[in-house]
Image: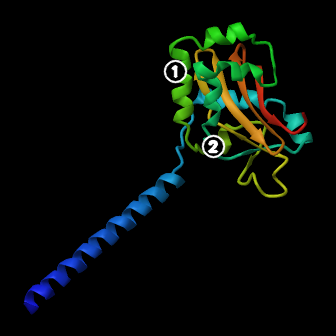
Amino acid sequence: MKYKMNLMADQMQKAHLVISVLLCFSIQMVLYAQDTDYVYLSNTEYEVINDLFSNPKSIEKNHLKLYFKTDFDREWRVYFNVDNKDLLYELPNFGTLKNEELESVLMGENRVELLRSINQLRPYSLENKKIRNIPLSKSFDSEKDLAYVWRISKPIIIGDYAFLKRMMMNEGNFLILHKKEKWEVVRVFYVWNTLY
């Protein structure tokens, strides 16, 4: 009887050890996944970012910087869902791309591709040597950085158009750029802006 109790206690200790190791491993994997950087942006995606921030005088004058990791918030996908498309046009916006033109850009598979790409956004590290005109910052939420550091999503390129989200302390918007000689902003939708 004593032997059976010792055997059960030994088995319980082993089970406890296995469960503890598995729990530690699971926690470590979750932490690793949260801290993983998806390093690679394509040259075209860097071209979009560089063309977006192509006015170095304005950037220097206003002390603007760009956060060194891309934002991966996915909430802005709701505006491109076909069931909610009226929400998109109710946002304050400006630009040369008309609603009808935007609808034709987002026809069929393009809308599906945009929504899928927004859902798959990850925290990509921007490479300093590939960013022109705007310095990178390791912080966006310190008191000195709040009003000067932009955070952007990874550009989502669909044909000749690029979609990305951009925000800082007093402004949050998403932009549509069109490839001509360079990438040009053709529409800006303000999700929030403290200036309004």
Q: Position of residue 155 (x, y in %)?
A: 63, 30
Secondary structure at badge 2 equals loop
State the CA–CA distance, disc 1 to disc 2: 29 Å
Q: Is residue 87 above or below residue 8?
A: above
The residue under label 1 is which amino acid type?
A: Val
Q: Residue at (77%, 44%) from the top-left corner?
A: 135
Q: Position of residue 87 (x, y in %)?
A: 70, 23
Which quadrant of the rendered structure holds the N terminus?
A: bottom left
Quadrant containing the C terminus is: top right
Q: Position of residue 73 (x, y in %)?
A: 62, 41
Residue 84 seen from this side: yes
The first of marks 1 and 2 along the sequence is: 1
Residue 77 location (% of width, % of height)? 61, 30
Q: Which amino acid type corresponds to the residue marked 2 in the rendered image?
A: Glu
Residue with the mark numbered 2: 127
- Looking at the picture, tell me which residue is in the foreground, 39 or 167: 167
* Residue at x 69% of width, y 18% of height: 86
Residue 10 left/right relative to 74: left
For numbered disc 1, what is the local secondary structure?
helix
Q: Is residue 185 visible?
A: no
Any mark on residue 112, and which?
1
Circle 1 packing at 10 Å, graded few (<14), some (14-19), many (20+), is: some
Quarter of image, res 176: top right
Which label was assigned to residue 31? none
Residue in the picture at 22% in, 78% down: 12
